[in-house]
Amino acid sequence: MEQRVLEMENVRFCGVVTAAVSHEIKNMLAIINETAGLLDDFTRQAEMAKVPLEPERVHDSVAAINRQVRRADGVVRHLNRFAHSADREAETVDLAEIIELFVALTARRAAACGADIQVEPGAAAVKVETNPFLLLHLLWRGLEFALAIIGAGARLRMTVEAGPDGGRGGQLTMRWHAPAAADETGIEFPGACDRELLARLPGKCLLRRQHDGFLLVLP
Amino acid sequence: MRILLVDDEEELVSTLAERLTLRGIDADWAASGEEALALAAQYKYDVAVIDLKMPRISGIDLKKQLAVDHPRLQFIFMSGHGSASTFRSGVDEAGGVDYFLFKPVDINQLLSRVKELVERASGPEWQTTNR
């Protein structure tokens, strides 16, 4: 695969992630906007009727704004971690942290397709030397493949385990439980781009398709 | 005038509905396409304000279904898109849309769009009855 094609796919991946996050942030801003507007409505009503504001309504509105600020902070934190995933070609990462970030970035995308994506508790602190950006990109392509074949109401589960050879390295699994999974979608996984991403991850990595998911082994 | 607000962000539609109610508009809200279809089967709405991106039943699919079941219903889309061009490409497949608003929504702009649509929809009827 040409370098240029892979670079375009990397840019496309960045675009999809930032578009999804910006939509989420817009929603939070919209809620803050409406809640502030509601507070203003209450104030105007109180002024016109010359009655005091009801403290409980004010407290509820302030609590709603605070909730959205905390939610937005979480989303922006994840976006920041994603942006920094491209800082270095290789670094030591905790795989559990990577999939936690991955699920945070993609849960809404999965939900839009009627699927639920969750991380199952696995081995503690599995650290590998990898390129976090390329790894996230590869996982995203695996997710897009899964979303194309599973029907609404499907469950996607991700796990992290220590590597198979004496605990060195680690392995990531994505499995789906889909009552209406399609056999033929015309989409291939791993395709040429996925294999190229795999080849560019540091060390000798392995990606194996299984009937209900895939396994990624990292050295 | 009765309007239906649909968005999977429950806090957004419930607050928007409360603000519209304070302005004398009958506003109901639904947090999913399924809930919206159930409400529309129960009550007669003049305008549906629908979020474009929703899980399971998307805003576009909901609009298509509501338009078949309730031919006189008018539609406004809400979106978190950043520009009209990216938004337009998303709604073209919905067979057109009367209006769209970007989030965060300006309530006065929403009100004027709703009133405009209701007046436009009731126009021909008024002319017919006054001939």
Image (tube, helix red, strand yellow):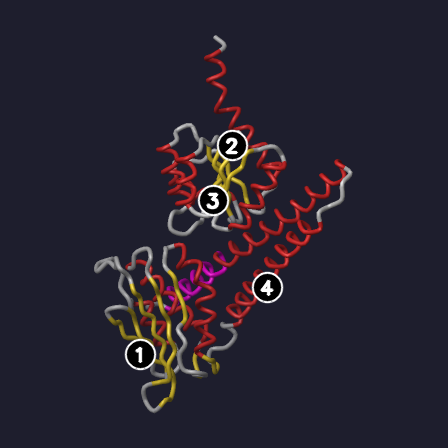
State the SS at label 3: strand
* The disc label shown at residue B30, or none: 3
Q: Distance between the residues labelled 3 and 4?
A: 27 Å
Identify which residue is drawn at 37% across, 84% down: A162
Please tell me which residue lies in front, A103 or A82: A103
For the N terminus of chain A, the image quarter is: bottom left
* Residue furthest to the left: A183
Q: Is the magenta stretch mostly helix, strand or loop?
A: helix
Q: Name the residue under label 4.
A: A73
Name the disc covering residue A156, or none. none
Label 1 in the same subunit as label 3: no
The answer to whether residue A128 is seen in the rendering is: no
CB atoms of marks 1 and 3 within 8 Å: no
Q: Distance from label 2 to label 4 (Cα)?
A: 36 Å
**Which amino acid is tagged 3?**
Ala
A8 left or right of B106 in image: left
Chain to which mark 3 belongs: B
**Which is closer to the viewer, label 3 or label 4?**
3
For the C terminus of chain A, the quadrant is bottom left
**Whole-number angstrom distance, CA of label 1 to CA of label 2:** 58 Å
Q: Mark 1 points at which residue?
A: A206
Residue A171, horizontal then vertical, whole percent: 36, 80
The chain containing the residue under callout 1 comes to A
**Residue at numbered disc 2:** B2
Of the image marks 4 and 1, the number of the one nearer the N terminus: 4
